[in-house]
Amino acid sequence: MMNILLVFLGGGLGSVFRYLVKIFCERNLSGVFPYATFCVNVAGSFFIGFVCALVFYKTSLISPQLKLFLTVGVAGGFTTFSTYSFEVVELFRNGHFAVGCVYSVLSVIISLAAVICGALSAKYIGS
C-alpha cells in the first residue's frame, strides 16, 4: 500500500511539473514544434538516467522506495510518450511532415543521450 501511495504522490508532482513546463513553453516559444513535450521528455530522460545511476553507483543514497517515487512516480507523471505520439500524428495530419520527422528523430536521439548524460552525472557524484 505504501508503494502505491509513493507512486501516486510522485505522479501528481511530476504532472504538475509537466503542466508548468507547458505553460512556460506556450508563453516563451512559438511555432508548430511541440517544445513542451520535447523538453519534458528530454529532461525526464536525464532525470531517470540520473536516479537509476545513483541507485546503481551510490546505493546508499537512494532507498528502493525513493527510487520508486522518483522514477515510476515523478518521472512517469512528468514525461509523456502518449502525448509525443499524438503530436507526431497531428503534425503529419496537418501537413507538417518535415517538422514531424525532425521531432521524432530528435526526441528519440536526444532523450537517449539524456539518459546517458544523467547516468554519467550521477556516477561521478562524490568521486
Image (cartoon, rainbow, N blue to C red):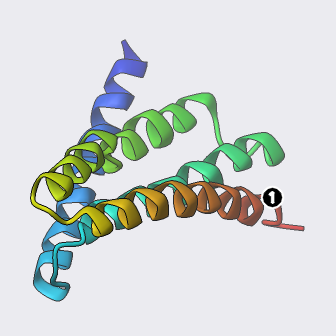
Position above or below: 122 against 31: above
Instruction: Say which residue appears at 71% left-offset and 49% top-offset.
Output: 54
Q: Identify the residue at image location x=42%, y=20%.
A: 3
Quarter the C terminus occupies: bottom right
Question: Could you say which quadrant of the image residue 33 lies in?
Answer: bottom left
Q: Which residue lies under the disc numbered 1?
A: 123
Q: Amino acid at mark 1?
A: Lys
Horizontal side of 95 relative to 72 (left or right) equals left
Q: Position of residue 53 (x, y in %)?
A: 72, 48
Q: Nearer the viewer, residue 31 or 101?
A: 101
Location of residue 113 by image quarter? bottom right
Residue 89 picture location, percent across and down: 20, 47
Tell me the quadrant of the picture where the N terminus can be found.
top left
Residue positioned 77% across, 62% down in the render: 120
Secondary structure category for the residue under label 1: helix
Which of 127 and 75 lies nearest the eye of the viewer?
75
Q: Is residue 125 above or below residue 72?
A: below
- Crowd tier of the residue under label 1, counting other residues whose Cα lies within 10 Å: few below 14, some 14–19, many 20 or above: some
The answer to which of 72 and 90 lies nearer the viewer is 90
Residue at the outermost top position: 1
Where's residue 117, x and y in %?
A: 68, 64
In this view, which residue lies farthest toward the bottom? Answer: 28
Along the viewing direction, whichever of 54 and 25 lies nearer the viewer: 25
